[in-house]
Amino acid sequence: MARKLRTLGEIASYTFSNKVEWKENSEKHSGWVNNRPLIDKFLLIALPSTPYKKVDQAMMDRVRDKIWEQGGSDSLVNKTIQAMQTAMNYCISRGQIEMPALELAYSHFGRKGIQYKFDRLDEEVINQPIFSPKQILNMYDLGMELGQTEGQQFINCAESIVMSGFTGLGWSEFSQLKTCDIFLTENPPEVRVGYRRDFRIKKGCRARAVPLVGAAEMLIPILRRRIMDTEGNANIQLFGDDWWGHDYGQDQHRRVFEHITNLLNLTRDSRGYKRTVYCLRHSYCTNTYKATQNAYQVHKLMGHSQMKTTERYLHLVTEDLAHGLGTYNQVATAT
């Protein structure tokens, strides 16, 4: 019978070798990419030779304090501790280490039996910066202008800015669009996301049709021109082929985007938080809600599988909530 694991280093090695989500080059999961640096960070603080039976809440508190000293956030603390907790519980499930005593404060009894469950820090949820519709149009205009002197990449970025800002599609979605995803003859015209078998959508998202109405109508001639440029080739990506290679292309797109926001003094919001390309998706969610006051409609347009995900995207302030109440009061008075 094989010797059971004794140290944190052995637990980490066993988990990375056997847990599907953590195994290198796993096609279905990226856990090995995310968890390896987290486990490495943990083992720099609590050495690999540490016996797992000495791991308790006090040790986790020391890990927390050390990460704080290094300038780490509460989120990083939680992720680091969660990674080691997951590895230890995996080894319990495989019979490689003993389960903790139930009376310990950091143990938990659930459907998988007794497992480790260490304290998590309360994380402050920071609303991501957003762009107003006018700012999105200003970025588009500047990108098109720069494209005349600085190169086609600025025109490509400008068109993807209005695509993301007025439809809510993120890079991973609009870079996959092909002719067969665009339905300009429908009433209203729409872009269909995730309906193709080979269209990859993020976990937690669903296939959806996004209507090209309102501000999004300006995308119709852009899409029509791009479709014509493909000369009927259904395999060409309408936006993804603007950039060379997915990882390198995304990085190039980000640099061009930041050049545009820098020139317009839009790099950071009034709180000092940096605006990124993904903030365009947040902006679509918030701006659409402000216009419709209908969270369920926004939920469907964003393609979130759960309403609570959509709620995290809504960056509402007091005057927005007051506006909704004012509308309600007007209806109540009229009746």
Image (cartoon, rainbow, N blue to C red):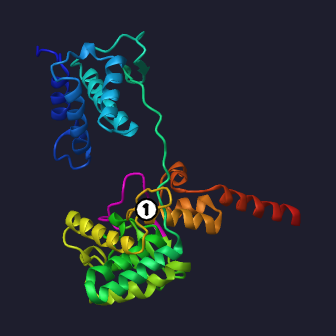
On the picture, is 115 further left or further right than 21? right
Q: Is residue 206 magenta?
A: yes
Quadrant the N terminus occupies:
top left
- Kindly indicate the quadrant of the structure image that contains residue 288: bottom right
Q: Is residue 232 among the parts visible in the rendering?
A: no
Disc 1 crowd rating (10 Å Cα; few below 14, some 14-19, many 20+) is: some
Q: Nearer the viewer, residue 284 or 240?
A: 284
- 220 is higher (above) or lower (below) than 326: below
The image shows residue 118 at horizontal and vertical percentages of: 39, 24
On the picture, is 137 further left or further right than 243? right
Residue range corresponding to the magenta coloring? 196-209
The image shows residue 152 at horizontal and vertical percentages of: 26, 84
Q: Is residue 251 among the parts visible in the rendering?
A: yes
Quadrant the C terminus occupies:
bottom right
Name the residue rendered at 42%, 9% in the picture: 103
Q: Nearer the viewer, residue 119 or 311?
A: 119
Marker count (numbered): 1
Name the residue rendered at 46%, 65% in the picture: 208
Kindly state the secondary structure of the residue where label 1 is placed: loop
Identify the residue position indicated by label 1 in the image. Answer: 268
User: What secondary structure do most residues of the magenta stretch adopt?
Assistant: loop
The image shows residue 255 at horizontal and vertical percentages of: 28, 68
On the picture, is 280 further left or further right than 58? right
Name the residue rendered at 25%, 40% in the picture: 21
Q: Is residue 76 magenta?
A: no
The image shows residue 35 at horizontal and vertical percentages of: 25, 39
On the picture, is 316 further left or further right than 30? right
- What kind of residue is marked 1? Arg
